[in-house]
Structure formats: C-alpha cells, structure tokens
Amino acid sequence: MVPKELDIWGIYLPPLPVSAILGTLAMILTAYLLNRYRLSRFFVVPQLVFISVAAIYTCFIGTYLIPSGKKNFPFPYASW
C-alpha cells in the first residue's frame, strides 16, 4: 500500500489530519442537530458521545472518502 498525500493550496498533508478535521466538523454539525431537536438529553455523558462519534466519523472519512492508494478496494488482500 502506497501512502498518498493531499495537496491543499500547495501544502502536502497526510490523510489522517484532513479526515480528523472533517470528522470533527461533521460531529459539530451532528451535535448541533442533536441539541436543536433535544435528542442529546437522552445521553448520560454527552461529551463522551461527542468524542466517540467524532472518532467514528474520522475513521469512516479516512477509510471511504479520502483516497489512500488501495488498488483492490473491496478486497485489499485479493492478490493472495
């Protein structure tokens, strides 16, 4: 697997910080909607829900939305 870098205005960035920023922004939007519709009152510790869902969004964005150079995407070990 060859790592890829993202070119943002001439600055090369690894995919993890970019996906972490996008995951945090997605979680801020989700937290806003949960607070807007008063669904966050059902969580015992909303701060832990914020952190855990931000981590889930980060993993999802880093795996599926940011290109990483995988050639056999659904089956990464298909060449066995």
Image (cartoon, grey):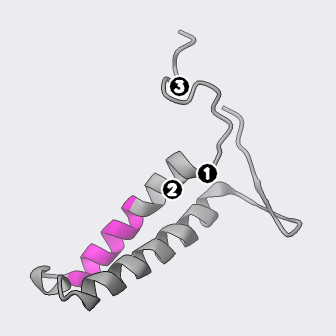
Write down the residue under mark 1.
66
Q: Is residue 1 above or below residue 43?
A: above
Marked residue nearer the N-terminal end (1 or 2): 2
Mark nearest the camera among 3 and 2 is: 2
Residue type at mark 1?
A: Ile
Residue type at mark 2?
A: Ile
Q: Residues within 10 Å of mark 3 (few under 14, many from 20)?
A: few
Residue type at mark 3?
A: Pro
The reply to whether the magenta stretch includes residue 48 is: yes
Please state, as top left, top right, bottom left or bottom right, where the N terminus lies in the image.
top right
- Looking at the rendered structure, the secondary structure element under dot 2 is helix
Write down the residue under mark 2.
61
Q: Are marks 1 and 2 in contact (CB under 8 Å)?
A: yes
Write down the residue under mark 3.
76
Disc 3/disc 2 C-alpha distance (Å): 18 Å
Disc 1/disc 2 C-alpha distance (Å): 6 Å
Magenta segment boundaries in residue numbering: 46-56
